[in-house]
Structure formats: structure tokens, C-alpha cells
Image (spheres, rainbow, N blue to C red):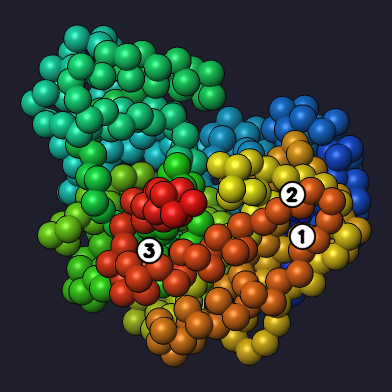
Amino acid sequence: MFGTVLIANRGEIAVRVLRACRELGIRTVAVHSTEDRDSAVVRMADRSVQIGPAPARQSYLNAAAIIEAARQTGAEAVHPGYGFLSENPDFAEVCEASGLTFIGPPAEVIATLGDKTAARAAMSAAGLPLLPGSIEPLVDVEGAARLAGEIGYPVIIKAAAGGGGRGMSIVEDPSEFSRAYQQTRGTAQTLFGDGRVYVERYLASARHVEIQILCDGYGNAIHLGERDCSVQRRHQKLVEETPAPGLPAELTARMGEVAVRGALATGYLGAGTFEFIVDTENNFYFMEVNCRIQVEHPVTEAVTGVDLITEQIRIAAGERLTLTQDDVRPRGVAIECRVNVEDPTRNFAPTPGVLEQFVPPGGPFLRVDTHGYAGYRVPAAYDSLLAKVIAWAPDRAQAIARMRRALGEFTIEGPGIRTTAQFLDRVLRDPLFAEAKHDTSLVARILEADAQAT
């Protein structure tokens, strides 16, 4: 096992990784920008190293500074969390070349699965179902438009190097295709430095369901069930739950089986997530692989009792999986709500500032992952996620009731501070969500209904 792990991230996930390390008896090093010098993880870590100014490109995306911090502190491994450099194959390769263990898949696996078209090709070869669309990146608008016509509208244009719900455009009508194609290419080049795009059929009424996997370095792979992530705003997840409500157990079991097949076919290592789209006829199609821990991993932990971060670290240290597929026996229902420092009435604009009061909810079967505390200044430079609330209960109705109670207990106050807590409660009491008849269009419908009501 490692003696010291450097946490190459910030916010709640950095605190989460630190706690797992501490339970394993591992010393921790927190890296931070000048903006995060007073962050919770810096306060908690055994050592901390400032790696740059506030802009992420000069700090949390500065691979050289992170590697130097690891060298200075004697760290043996780097946990990248999610976002930032977590799915950057070059960073994984540099870690290895520097004698550090990257707690994640090998660089070549990240390179393949991080490229959406390469991932589609690999999963197609492994026998996973795909939506009709292009396997290779599209080279010109005329050929792309012809393919879109063959697929049938609506279609979605996606950046090959995209992720996090960014770099995609939905096209409803052929007359809109050329403009959307050029716009998506430009956006992809700006965001990811890679303008390649591909096209696939778009399912307007669909569910977003993902499978959590774990793979060790000895050919063992398991899945830990599914998570429904259909409550989204502009492709950004707001509410996640497990099990996926209303889906047949045979369907989700098949999804788990094909996810494991895809992982083994690519030589995956560690924790990862296979994302699928499920249509109204319960057909499912592969979308992408996230080569990292997910924001929503706690709901899987709540129903399985498996500490996914600990498993990540153990696998990276060369240990075998401690579980077989038969050992995975999910129990009950877990729901996660992401409480962001945003104003839902202003199109979810971030509202950074000082938290004069911060009191998270409590009570039985409730977990709050956060980096917030009274007096903390929420910076404007980074993601607005402040806390994740995870509620477990024997059934879905009780889990929803527990979550609504928890959201109502939150005290988050400060000049100009607004959060999504009340909006999340609005989502949970929506009849479509309560009856598990929702899909990825739910938030847009709620916002439209509320706008009409005012």
C-alpha cells in the first residue's frame, strides 16, 4: 500500500479522497491554488503545496507543478478525482514516467475511451449496442449532412474529445444542420483543442442510465449496479439515484454484463462508469465511458456498502478485487442531489461569495459530502458544486421524503449567495419524478412550466 498520496483536485472530491486515504493509513498531500489556500482539504491534509494562481490552467491543470509537488513531498501516487486532469492521458503518462502511480486506468486506455469516436469503435467491436451514427470523425459538412439524413432527424452532433455535457448540439431540422455542425466544431476546438465531431441519432424522450464498474490488474471485473442520471440541466446532472426506477431488473443486469465486457475488452483498470441511453421501449445504447470516479458515486456506495475510492486506491496499489459479482448485493434506494451555489431564477448563474452561515442537514441514513464551512469564501474561478446530499431508505418513496426533509434543513447564507436546494425540492415533488415517469427533458419542462406560471 502507498505511504503518501497526492490529491490533485479540490472541493468536495478532494475531501472525500483524503478521508479514504486516512482510513487506509495513508498520508495525504493537498495541492491548491492561491484562491484555495483556506479550503477544507488544505486544512485537513498532512501537507499542502501551493501550485499556482487562481486560474485552473495555471494550477489544477498545471501537470508540471503537480508532479513537482509530488516529488517535493515524497508522494508515491496521485489521485486525480474527477474533472481537471482526471481523464488526461498525457498526465497519466507523465505520472508513470516520473515514478508515480496514477490512480486510474493506464494512459493508453484513457486515450482510447476519452476519444468518443474511438470509444464507439471499441465498444462496437466488443458487441455493445450503439445508436445509429458515425464511428469515425466526420471530415466535411456535406458528408455529415448526408449521414444525418440517413439516420433521420433529430440528430445530435458531438465533439469527439468532449465530456461533461459540453460540445454538443441537437439538430431538429435539416436546414439547421450546417450551422450547428460548424458551431459545434468551433466550440469543440475552443473547449478541447480538438475540432473533430461525430453524429448520432438523438432520442428526445430517453433515460440516462450508467453502470459502475471495478477492474483489477488480474483480469477480474465486476459491476455494482446502475444509476439513473436523467435529471439534467443542459446535459449537467442534478439528481442521481439507484436503482434506476421503473426499469426491469433483467434490463439493468444486461447493461451491467455488457459494461463488464466492454471494460475487459479495453484492458480497463480501477473504477469507471459506462454510460447508456435507454429509450421508451427499454432498448439501451452505449454512449461513453468515464475513466474516473463519478460525482454521483456515493449512491452506489450507499446501496452496496462498497467504498469505491478505497477500492480505487487498492487496485492502483496492485491488490486484487476483494469482491466477486456474487458479493454485490444492492439494498434499498439511494438518491443524490447536487447543491450548487447558483441562482435558478437567473438561468443557474453562479453566485460566489462568503458563507456566513453553513449548516448541513443531519439525521439517519443521510450523508453530506461537502467542502463548505461557515466563513468559507466560495470562489468564482471553479465549479459551483458546494455539497452533495445522499439519502438512503428501504424504498424510493421514503428516500424522496428523506431527501426533501434534508434539503429543507440546509442553512446556507451569505451576501448574494443563492443555491439550488429549493429547486431540487421542486424537482423531487414533480409528479413525473415521483412516479418515475421522467426523462432527460424533465428540468426543461419544469422551468417552462414555472415561467408560464409567473
Viewed as shown, does residue 418 lie left or right of 389?
right
| Rendered location of residue 8, percent (x, y) | 72, 46
How many other residues sit within 10 Å of disc 3, few (<14), some (14-19) or many (≥20)?
many
Residue 69 location, quadrant: top right
Q: Residue furthest left?
A: 150
Q: Which residue is mark 2?
A: 10
Residue at 18% x, 13% y: name it: 143
Q: Which residue is mark 1?
A: 371
- What's the mark number on residue 120? none
Tell me the kind of residue under disc 3: Asp
Residue 183 in the image: above or below residue 43: above
Image quarter of the N terminus = bottom right
Is residue 318 or residue 158 the one in the foreground?
Answer: 158
Residue 79 in the image: above or below residue 320: above
Q: Which residue is mark 3?
A: 228
Which mark is nearer the camera, 2 or 3?
A: 3
Do the numbered discs 2 and 1 sit on residues whose CB atoms are within 8 Å?
Answer: yes
Residue 407 in the image: above or below residue 71: below
Count of number-bearing discs: 3
Identify the secondary structure beneath mark 3.
strand
Residue at 43% x, 44% y: name it: 235
Is residue 185 or residue 175 the one in the foreground?
Answer: 175
Residue at 41% x, 84% y: name it: 397
